[in-house]
Amino acid sequence: MSIALVTGANRGIGREVARQLAEREYTVILTARDEEKARSAADELPGDVRALALDVSDPASIAAAAEEVADDPGSLDVLVNNAGAGADFGVSGADPDFHAIQQSLDTNFFGAYRLTVALLPLLRRSEHPRVVSVSSGMGGIAEMGGWSPGYRVSKASLNAMTRILSTELADEGVLVNSACPGFVATDMGGPMGATKSVEDGASGVVWLATLPDDGPSGGFFRDGEPVAF
Ligand SMILES: NC(=O)c1ccc[n+]([C@@H]2O[C@H](COP(=O)([O-])OP(=O)(O)OC[C@H]3O[C@@H](n4cnc5c(N)ncnc54)[C@H](OP(=O)(O)O)[C@@H]3O)[C@@H](O)[C@H]2O)c1
């Protein structure tokens, strides 16, 4: 039995990643910051899908969730850091909203980083541990443009975490990668005109979550193809 935990999985890409992993017979721990929403999303999905409350911006919630997973099921094969917030889309970097930048960092970077470190002892028990962080092309420094500074910096930081941890964990066989889902028609992307389906956006994430042991680590991919960091 392989076990996967997905954050922010009550809707959007996270929910679809949970669905696709359950379809591949993973036991999925579907997490959401609202416990009721986690439960109803888990109930709606076929397969072995369990609900867990987890607000990644709250270190106490991370500690409590890690303890619950350590108690039962006691190990973890796949972590998908999907939860994300776009608190300052379209805001000028020259006229920033520092509160929104902090919010973006708390969820998109500190949340994913703290959770990954909290779950590392459980991932180390896996024979095929995988960490996938759902990033964004907007966090790629090589082609970075203006606006949305909090979102961009938080995703660039997330990508840095991928590189740091993939390097340090290489000898232990933990494959750590970042994924850009593309411009996906979710509650986040839809209002900005995204047309890519949620299924297609999630499939590149699931590919990284289910890599074979000789798969890449320390990479940044969209639809299975490398993206510039
Ligand atoms: N859609 C796109 O075009 C696109 C493009 C590039 C990257 N991405 C990334 O893809 C990921 C998923 O986005 P999406 O498009 O599916 O957006 P979405 O539909 O807005 O879903 C975001 C999810 O993150 C959760 N979340 C936000 N803050 C959280 C927190 N503090 N703790 C736990 N969960 C939290 C939300 O929960 P609530 O329901 O409680 O708010 C929701 O489940 C994000 O990391 C996003 O940055 C999306």
Image (tube, rainbow, N blue to C red):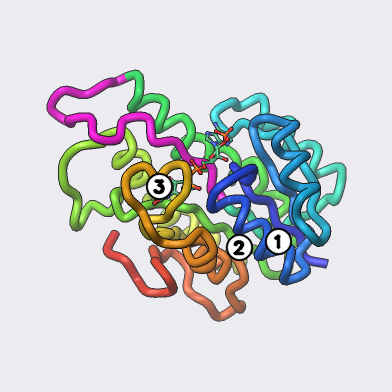
Judge from the rendering whether residue 120 lies leftward or rightward of residue 147; answer left or right: right
On the image, numbered disc 3 is attached to which residue? Answer: 190
Q: Which amino acid does label 3 sit on?
A: Gly
Nearer the N terminus, badge 3 or badge 2? Answer: 2
Which is more N-terminal, label 3 or label 1?
A: 1
Q: Which residue lies under the disc numbered 2?
A: 130
Q: Name the residue under label 1.
A: 77
Secondary structure under the numbered disc 1 in the rendered image: loop
> Residue shown at 27%/21% (left/top)?
97
| Crowd rating for badge 1 (residues with CA inside 10 Å; few <14, some 14–19, many 20+) | many
Magenta span of residues: 81-98
Residue 87 within the magenta-colored segment of the rendering: yes
Dividing the image into 4 quarters, which one contains the N terminus? bottom right
Q: Which of 67 and 17 is in front in this view?
A: 17
Q: At x 42% / y 55%, what residue is drawn?
A: 184
Which amino acid is tagged 2? Answer: Arg
